[in-house]
């Protein structure tokens, strides 16, 4: 079995076991990710512009 197929199999088994994190935990993680992206927006835009110059505004987030 390929490493990717094995990983997908393990992830699927974990999901089907019902032992995943509670929804409140997942929501909190997504909210934290949103705050992180807000805080790092300028850095992300600058890095994106350095890698792939595009017309202004095309990479704006939010």
Image (cartoon, grey):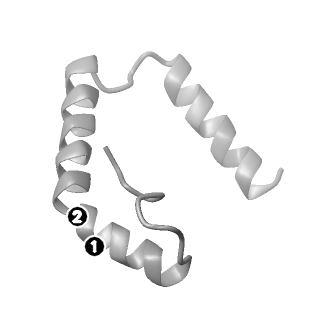
The count of marks equals: 2
Pick the front one: 20 or 42: 42
Residue at the limit of the structure toward the bottom, as seen here: 50
51 sits left or right of 28 in the view: right
**Residue lying at 34% horizontally and 68% vertically, measured from the top left:** 44
Point out which mark residue 23 bears: none
42 sits left or right of 61 in the view: left
**Residue lying at 48% horizontally and 58% vertically, measured from the top left:** 58
Q: Quadrant of the C terminus?
A: top left
Per the image, label 1 sits on a secondary structure element best described as helix
18 vs 61: above or below: above
**Residue lying at 44% horizontally and 59% vertically, measured from the top left:** 59
Residue at the limit of the structure toward the right, as seen here: 1
Residue linked to disc 2: 40
Does the residue at mark 2 contact the one at mark 1 (Cβ under 8 Å)?
Answer: yes
32 sits left or right of 62 in the view: left
Residue at the limit of the structure toward the front, as seen here: 55
Point out which mark residue 43 bears: 1
Give how far across and how far down residue 8 sits, in percent.
66, 40
Q: Assess disc 2: are there few (<14), some (14-19) or many (≥20) residues with their C-alpha within 10 Å of its C-alpha.
A: few
Per the image, label 2 sits on a secondary structure element best described as loop
Figure quadrant of residue 32: top left
Pick the front one: 53 or 10: 53
């Amino acid at each position: 079995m390929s490493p990717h197929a094995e990983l997908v199999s393990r992830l699927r088994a974990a999901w089907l076991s019902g032992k995943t994190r509670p929804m409140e935990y997942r929501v909190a993680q997504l909210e934290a990710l949103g705050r992180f992206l807000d805080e790092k927006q300028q850095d992300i835009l600058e890095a994106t512009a350095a890698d792939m110059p595009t017309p202004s505004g095309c990479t704006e987030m939010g």
